[in-house]
Amino acid sequence: DVHAERATYPQRKERLMAELREQAPTAIAGHDVVRSLELDTNDGFKWWTEDGSWLLVRFSGTEPLVRVYVEATGAERRDAMLAEGELLVRGES
């Protein structure tokens, strides 16, 4: 989880949603993104990479935090994708 200041969370969420919608990652942890999906709940995004792994970024509706979920082909890959997902949410990638 990536925590945010409660006072600025709504603006940060809106800005990050717009950025991810307009400039989705083309690669995650060295693997090309082959499929992208904006969640029907309008609170996150999911990307699949060429090896079948995926990364999900979801904004909490009750707390000032963004959750990053990963399913990967191995522990090393999982850790790399999770780290990159957190950088993406922090705006550092």
Image: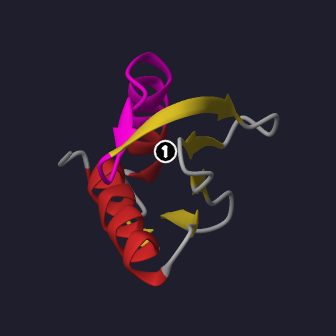
Task: Tell me if residue 5 can be seen.
Answer: no
Residue at the (56%, 69%) spot, across then down: 73
Q: Residue at x 20, y 45 (%)?
A: 93
Q: Residue furthest top?
A: 22
In the visual, does 75 lie left or right of 86?
A: right
The structure residue drawn at horizontal position 33% and vertical position 68%, both measured from the top left corner, is 80
Is 21 located above or below residue 79 in the figure? Answer: above
Q: Give the residue displayed 74% in from the left and 37% down from the top.
A: 39
x%, y% of residue 14? 48, 33
Please state the horizontal and vertical placement of residue 59, each as a whole percent of the image: 58, 53
Up the image or down, 77 lies above or below 38; here it is below
Farthest bottom residue in view: 75
Q: Against 62, is 42 above or below? A: above
As drawn, the residue found furthest toward the right would be: 40
**How packed is label 1: few (under 14 Cα within 10 Å), some, or many (20 or more)?**
some
Locate residue 92, reporting x and y percent: 17, 49
* Relative depth, front residue between 65 and 34: 34
Does residue 54 appear anywhere in the picture? yes
What residue does disc 1 label?
10
Q: Is 12 displayed left or right of 14 in the figure?
A: left
* The residue stretch that appears in magenta: 14-30
| 46 and 72: which is toward the camera | 72
Q: Is 12 covered by the magenta stretch? A: no
